[in-house]
Amino acid sequence: TYVVLKVQNLKSTTIDRRGSQPCWEQDFMFEISADEKGFILELWKKGLLWDSILGILWIPLATVEHATDEGPGAWWTLHSEVIKSGSKIYGTKTPTSHQILLDVYFALPF
């Protein structure tokens, strides 16, 4: 499995890991504009011919706190559908059986 993060026109991907409880321990940092509403996280399963999506999560930036260091993170339930208004995603619905542990925060300047 691997994770894809999408915010604005930016996209980052983890390396793929095997097993039922993969661990990526990977940091991502994005510079985004103040008008951005949130970002998308996708969990994918690598396949022989094509990859399949296991779940998707919309994280609103209004729920993200500021921090100077990593925290314990929180478990997030992944969903199978996105909620759109036009071409803009503003949520997810229909929970799957998959969860992911994330530590999401705005990095404060040193």
Image (tube, helix red, strand yellow):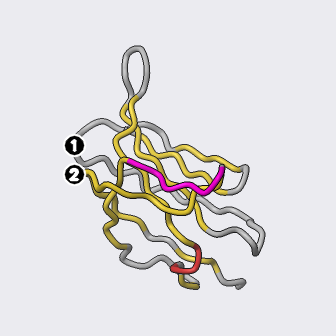
* Residue at point 58%, 61% (across, down): 39
Q: Report the quarter where the N terminus lies.
A: top left
Q: Is residue 83 magenta?
A: yes
Label 1: few (<14), some (14–19) or many (≥20) C-alpha neighbours in 10 Å: few
Q: Which residue is mark 2?
A: 97
Q: Nearer the viewer, residue 97 or 5?
A: 97
Q: Which residue is mark 1?
A: 20
The tag earlier along the polypeptide, 1 or 2, is 1
**Region of the chain picked out in magenta, as a range:** 81-86
x then y, percent, for residue 89: 58, 56
* Residue at point 30%, 47% (across, down): 22
x then y, percent, for residue 103: 44, 70
x then y, percent, for residue 26: 49, 55
Q: Nearer the viewer, residue 79 or 7?
A: 79
Is label 1 or label 2 in front?
2
Residue 33 in the figure: left or right of residue 68: right
Compared to residue 95, the image places residue 65 above or below, namely below
